[in-house]
Image: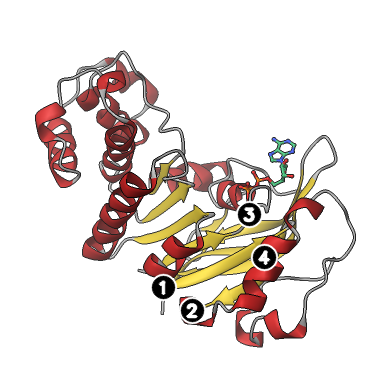
Amino acid sequence: MQTVLIAEDVEVVYPNGARALHPTRLSIEAGQFVVLLGASGAGKSTLLRALNGLVQPSAGRVVVPGLGSLEQPRLLHTHRRRTGMVFQQHHLIGRLSVLANVLMGRLGHYRSLSTLLPWSRADKERALAALERVDLLEHALRRADELSGGQQQRVGIARALVQQPRLLLADEPVASLDPATAERVLSLLHAICKADGLTAVVSLHQVPFARRFADRIVGLAAGRVLFDGAPAELSEPVLNALYGVATAVQSDHAIPTPASVRPPLSYVTEVPS
Ligand code: ADP
């Protein structure tokens, strides 16, 4: 399997001293739908953002095989252009049309001054095609803030797709949606990734969604990877370990990690600090 991204002992300590991520080693393989699972505060968002350089590791580095490390500014730019992001709160510009919001996904493909020019026909066609894939074509000219939460998240997905990414990072993409809408949006996202062979890393806190959609689940608690494996291996003891220690995040004390929930060696991602 081809590796598309490697976190090499990435550690994140925020300026206020919060150790959000202990040194973590993780390889992402092409075409997989990887779910980062864990309670609120587990470090999912921090890890996901580190994979795109939105959070700077305090130690360790993120490497794109064949390109190099994200520490190099030019590589970071290339990596971000190739990486679509979907956020929990959509990050849409409400007063702009749905189509204009989707076109924002093309910005990374241009030098700064060319963004003053009108969008090309090819870009508009790409944006409309992306909207068709998320079933929102007929809403293309509506203001984004007139859409429902689920529709807005589908616009967010279309904006990521129009970037023609090689990797998709989604940070709690359905956390603010009701369960039925969340299920529909996640199904759509999963189906698109599978149809395109698009590698995805998606953070979620809902276990049933992780079980249903993930090829691989990386379970985090208190800034450490406690589980890394197939959904079928996600047992009750693992879940207890993932959700039972959620509030201990700020402490530097070792989290009790029962032998039964330790990942197989080939999957080990946690490096003792
Ligand atoms: P999750 O995505 O699993 O909810 P986060 O990565 O958002 O977890 O947070 C992990 C820990 O880091 C939490 O304790 C959170 O309070 C802390 N944290 C997150 N972002 C920041 C920040 N910008 N500054 C300080 N602490 C932060």
- Within 10 angstroms of label 1, few (less than 14), some, or many (20 or more) residues? some
For image coordinates 59% across by 47% down, the residue present is: 45
How far across and down, in percent of the image, does residue 155 sit? 28, 35
Pointer 2 or 4: first along the chain: 2
The local secondary structure at tag 1 comes to loop
Marks 1 and 2 in Cβ contact (< 8 Å): yes
* Residue 152 as seen in the image, left or right of residue 233: left
Q: Residue at x 57, y 46 (%)?
A: 49
Q: Are marks 3 and 4 in contact (CB under 8 Å)?
A: yes
Neighbor class of circle 4 (other Cα within 10 Å; few <14, some 14-19, many 20+) is: many
Query: What label sits on residue 242 in the rendered view?
Result: 4
* Label 2: few (<14), some (14–19) or many (≥20) C-alpha neighbours in 10 Å: some
Q: Which residue is mark 3?
A: 39
Q: Compared to 206, does 49 lie above or below?
A: above
Q: Residue furthest right?
A: 253
Of the 4 image quadrants, the one containing the C terminus is bottom right
Q: Nearer the viewer, residue 211 or 201?
A: 211
The residue that label 1 is drawn on is 215
Give whichever of discs 1 and 4 has the lower sequence position: 1
Observer-side mark, 2 or 3, equals: 3
For marks 2 and 3 on the same chain, the one whose residue lies earlier in the sequence: 3
Q: Is residue 250 left or right of residue 190?
A: right
Q: Position of residue 269 (x, y in %)?
A: 66, 72
Amino acid type, callout 1: Asp
**Mark 3 vs mark 1: which is more N-terminal?**
3
